[in-house]
Amino acid sequence: MKTFAIETWGCQMNHHDSERLTGFMKLTGLDAVEDSSGADVILLNTCSVRERPVHKILSRIGDLARTNPSAVIGVCGCVAQQEGESLLRRGSNVGFVLGPGQVQRVGEAIRALQQGRRTVFTGFDPEQEYCFHTIFRKSSTRGMVTVAEGCGEYCTFCVVPHTRGREVSRPFDEILAEVRLLVRTGMREVELLGQTINAYRCPASGADFAQLLDAIAREPGLARVRFITSHPRYFTDRLIEVMATHSHVSRYLHLPFQAGSNRILERMHRRYTREQYVDLINRIREAVPGVNISTDVIVGFPGEDESDFERTLNLLESLRFGQVFAFAFSARPGTPATRYRDQVSEEVKSQRLQRLFAVADRVSLELNEKLIGQHLQVIVDGDSRRSSSDWQGRSDGNRVVNFPKQGLTARVGDVIQVRITRASAHSLYGEAAVASSRLPVLGASVAPLAAPDSM
C-alpha cells in the first residue's frame, strides 16, 4: 500500500475529520492522491444524519469493488459508528471501520491491514488526547478548529449523540494554542466548529463560548473569525455582545429553528418556543446590524399538519434568512421520532419541501439584490467554480462572491473589496475595487468581557 484517497460526505465537522485523517495517514507513510480510482486505500468519511446519504455510502462500496477492485476501503465517520461490524459484511474490500471518536486510530487500522487483519474501532473516549499538530489543512486561507465534539441535546429526530457521542469540550488554552499556530502559518480566517458550539464549557476553567470567542477575536493577525453551529437555547446576551464588539467576528450566523410550530418544536425536544426564537433573532439583529443569518428546517416531522407547516413558512417570510438548509424528515435508527405513529407521507413531505424552497429562494434573492451597488470585503478562496478567469471568495456575511481576475493582482488569501453588480439566490458577482492586506482588527483599547461570577 502506497497511496490513499478520502471521499467526504456531510458537515464541516466531517470535512475537518478528513483533514485529521489525512494527517494521520501521512504519518503511516502513505501518499495522498485525489482520484480514488488509483488509490490503494480509500477512506469513505461518512454522514448518517439522513437516510439517503447512508444508502449512497453503501452503494459507493459496491461501485469501488467494481472500479478499483484491488483497493481496500476504510469506512469512517458517522455511518461507521452507526453500523459498526456489519459494514465488514458489505464486501471483502472493506478493510476497517472507524467511528468519528476513533480518528486517531487510523494508523493502527492501516498496520492491522498490512498484517492481514480487518478491524472495527468505534465508541468514544473523552480522555483521548486531541492532536491538532498532525492536521493536514486543505485550505491555505481558512483553518477549521474543533471547539467541542458530540452533542447532549438529544433532539428526538437527531442521530448525532449516538454517532458522535455526548458533548465534550476541549480545553480553552489548547484551542487558543491551535488558533495561534494557524495564524503563524498564514491562515487569514478560522472557523470554530461544534455540533452545539455555544454550549461550550472549558473542562478546566468553566469558561463559556462567549469568553472563548472574545479571546480568539483578540489574537493579532486574524482577518475573520467564524463559528458554527449555534443552538438557540445557548445564545446568550454575552455572546451577542462579543459579536457586536469585534468587527472581524463574521457577520454570518447559522442558527437552526427546525420548525415554526410550538407543538412540533416540543415534539422535537428543542426546548425553546417560536416566540423565544423570534425574540433572539430580533436582539441579534439590533446589536449586530447587517448580520446574515442562515437556518435549518425540517419539513414533514411526524404529526406535522398543514397549519404547522404554514407556521414554518410564515416564520421564513417574517424573519427573512439569507440561506435556508431544509430537509424532509428522515427516520434515523435509535431516535424517538422513528417510533412515532403519525408519520407524514413521502409525497406530502416532498410537496412541502418544494413549497419551502420556493419561499426561501425568493427571500434570498431579494436580500442579495439589495447588495447590488454595495462594496463587500471578500477573502479570496481560489478559482471560481464557474470560470477559471474569475476569483471566488466569501464575504463577511458568508455569501459566495465571484469577480474577474483580469487587471487584478491578487492571491489566495488576499482581502479584496468587491462592488456587487449582479445577484442570484445563492451567489453574488462583482468587480474588484480595492485590495487590502487584511480586514480591520479592533485595537487593544477594547476591554475584554468580564469573567462570569461562577468562575
Image (cartoon, rainbow, N blue to C red):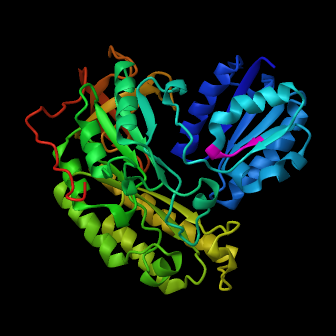
Quarter of the picture containing the N terminus is top right
Residue found at x 84% / y 29%: 113
Extreme residue toward the left, this view: 445
The answer to whether 229 appears left or right of 369 in the picture is right
Residue 177 pos. (x, y %):
37, 30
Across and down, in percent, residue 206 comes to: 33, 52
Is residue 119 rendered to the left or right of residue 272? Answer: right
For the magenta stretch, what is the residue range? 97-101
Residue displayed at 63% across by 34% down: 104
Q: Is residue 371 at least partly visible in the picture?
A: no
* Quarter of the image with the C terminus in it: bottom left
Q: Nearer the viewer, residue 174 or 246?
A: 174
| In this view, 396 is above or below 244 | above
Locate residue 216, reporting x and y percent.
29, 37
Q: Relative to 192, is 1 on the left or the right?
A: right
User: Image quadrant of residue 61?
Assistant: top right
